[in-house]
């Protein structure tokens, strides 16, 4: 269901996006759903939205009672009352990963979003920047797959903050190591299949 885009996660993404559009609140979908929008197909259990502080205040004011209640103990996590799916709001100016100040902060969604399949999502350079800045293995894995699906190379580095060039290069090298491994595996399989089909001497 997930990859048919008719599951509860996609329903929540569309419902919240529609609410933000109706209220004229600038936003961008980030996280796993943005990764999917940029053609690396993987599942995720929730949705992340990037808003400014003013956008967050407008969202809180615009929601109907029971429509998107807060998740207890998480001031920027909400529950879609129709689907039960949670979604987080990330704020412009805060920092990804540990949340400690660094060279990369969450940007203004108005400046870094693009429309893919009728939904406003983070553009590819900004998505990769935030994934690298979070400095988690899972996020590095997403970058490796985005490199693969978009056939990226060193020429993409200038689109990223200089502090991330080393991490991006490491993801490039990991992608190439994986490709070399797959090539060796394919060659070994072909040799084995060839020896199995060879006529007896």
Image (cartoon, rainbow, N blue to C red):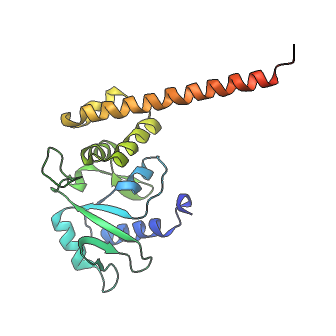
Q: Residue furthest top?
A: 201
Question: From this viewpoint, is residue 152 visible?
Answer: no
Q: Residue furthest left?
A: 101
Total numbered labels placed on residues in the image:
0
Residue visible at 40% across and 38% down?
144
In the depicted view, which residue is nearer to us: 87 or 170? 170
Residue 201: image quadrant is: top right
Question: From this viewpoint, is residue 42 visible?
Answer: yes
Up the image or down, 174 lies above or below 91; here it is above
* Side of 179 relative to 169 (left or right): right
Q: Position of residue 124 (x, y in %)?
A: 34, 44
Q: Residue furthest front?
A: 201
In the depicted view, which residue is nearer to us: 25 or 127? 127
Residue 166: image quadrant is: top left
Residue visible at 37% across and 63% down?
47
Residue visible at 30% across and 86% down?
65
In the depicted view, which residue is nearer to us: 183 or 51? 183
Position of the N terminus by quadrant? bottom right
Q: Position of residue 92 (x, y in %)?
A: 18, 57
Q: Position of residue 148 (x, y in %)?
A: 45, 36
Up the image or down, 140 lies above or below 169; here it is below
Q: Position of residue 106 (x, y in %)?
A: 21, 53
* Side of 121 relative to 162 (left or right): right
Residue 133: image quadrant is: top left
């Amino acid at each position: 269901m997930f990859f048919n885009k008719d599951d509860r996660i996609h329903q929540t993404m569309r419902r919240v996006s529609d609410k933000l559009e109706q209220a004229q609140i600038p936003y961008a979908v980030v996280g796993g759903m943005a990764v999917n929008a940029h053609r690396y197909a993987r599942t995720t259990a929730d949705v992340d939205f990037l808003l400014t502080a003013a956008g967050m205040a407008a969202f809180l004011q615009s929601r109907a009672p029971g429509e998107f209640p807060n998740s207890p103990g998480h001031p920027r996590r909400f529950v879609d009352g129709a689907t039960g799916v949670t979604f987080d709001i990330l704020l412009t100016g805060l920092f990804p990963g540990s949340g400690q100040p660094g060279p990369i902060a969450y940007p203004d969604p108005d400046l870094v979003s693009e429309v893919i399949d009728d939904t406003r999502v983070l553009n590819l350079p900004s998505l990769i920047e935030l994934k690298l800045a979070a400095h988690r293995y899972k996020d590095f894995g997403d970058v490796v797959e985005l490199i693969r699906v978009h056939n990226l190379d060193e020429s993409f580095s200038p689109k990223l903050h200089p502090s991330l060039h080393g991490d991006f290069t490491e993801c490039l090298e990991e992608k190439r190591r994986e490709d070399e491994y797959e090539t060796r595996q394919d060659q070994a399989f072909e040799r084995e299949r060839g020896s199995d089909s060879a006529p007896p001497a």
